[in-house]
Amino acid sequence: MNTWLFRRFRDAEIRVHELNYLFWECTTRCNLHCRHCGSDCSMNSREKDMPLEHFLQALDTIPKKDIPNPFTVVLTGGEPLLRPDITDCGRAIRQRGMGWSMVSNGFFYNADMQQKLLQAGLGALTISLDGLEEEHNWLRGHPESYSRAVQAIGLAARCPRIAFDVVTCVTRRNLAQLPELHKLLSGLGVPQWRLFTVIPIGRAAGNPDMILTPEELTQLMEFIKARRKEGGPLKTLFSCEGFLGPYEQVVRDTPFFCHAGVNIASVLIDGRICACPDIDRDVFSQGSIYTDSLWEVWQNRFQPFRNHDWARKGACSTCRQFRNCLGGGMHNWHGSCEGPLTCPYHDITSVS
């Protein structure tokens, strides 16, 4: 797509800001202890699971006439399958005429669970696989994590009723394993594979050795470029974490556009209303379902997500690509927000 036309499209999307993707951080409990976790989740999370009725009360503030088709609620965490009422959650969402999906580590996903989730209306699923066995287990902190994830991936990939994909966090340790992972996922019948890199937040901030060097990031881009060029049933693409300069529309289908606060919102575990759950919730939360209407907040707040002039600082203040990038993904602005934590465009162009 022509960059000028895409900017016109992006500006129109921002003006309309149709909410069609809502994350619900339904739990921060997790059975694994992932080294790259941005939320620092654990089995003994201090936060209690949000009661389903609290979330539904927030969801019901959205007028039925304003619910677009499709509209998807994404259950995330933590590990959503730790909730004993997970099927009740999905069923209640479907009864409101909305679709729902889930992001899972796959540990508890088996044939029996899949059938229960399908009966509750599950429409889409994402499972993580972060390397071959030794590497995945190291990153996830559990010796059975890999075998459980691969079993779950094979099961979900064979189910035609689920829109399914696999995500992989690419680190310095698993970068060389990507060709083997591609072969594995292709053999399992996975339709789509999304790759992303580490943002130094949460637990990941204490593991800087996982972050790709500029040369390694460029190597990742070339790997995705080659897989997309050769085609095949496994669609491979890079995530939406930042503007990529020469790799725009080469490793993704469309130019970079951070939809956080434009089409995407989230209800966090404590009731705060934000955009993607990985965004700095202390800086960018817009309200709370316990004091505000979710719909009113969506309609009348979220200004930092829809006007990025505030991001013209640090390296972004003089960057000639700012009008295309707008400061990159919102999850890259944490803490004092004096600049983005990472800049893939800078890293890639510094190599070339």
Image (cartoon, rainbow, N blue to C red):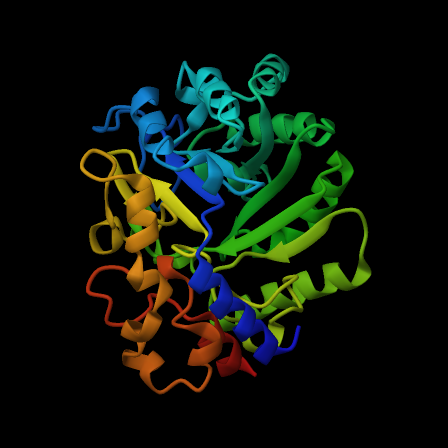
Q: Is residue 97 above or below residue 10?
A: above
Position of residue 288 in the picture relative to residue 176 (left or right): left
Task: Locate residue 21, reporting x and y percent.
Answer: 48, 44
Is residue 169 or residue 88 the one in the foreground? Answer: 88
Corner quadrant of residue 209 = bottom left
Residue name at image x 31 percent, y 75 percent: 309
Is residue 299 or residue 279 the one in the foreground? Answer: 299
Position of residue 248 in the picture relative to residue 30 (left or right): right
Residue name at image x 35 percent, y 61 percent: 305
Q: Is residue 178 above or below residue 68?
A: below
Q: Is residue 348 above or below residue 269?
A: below
Task: Locate residue 231, reporting x and y percent.
Answer: 80, 57
Q: Is residue 211 above or below residue 86?
A: below
Position of residue 309 in the picture relative to residue 19 (left or right): left
Position of residue 33 in the picture relative to residue 349 (left or right): left
**Residue 260 visible here:** yes
Residue name at image x 66 percent, y 72 percent: 1
Task: Locate residue 246, reporting x and y percent.
Answer: 60, 78
Corner quadrant of residue 152 = top right
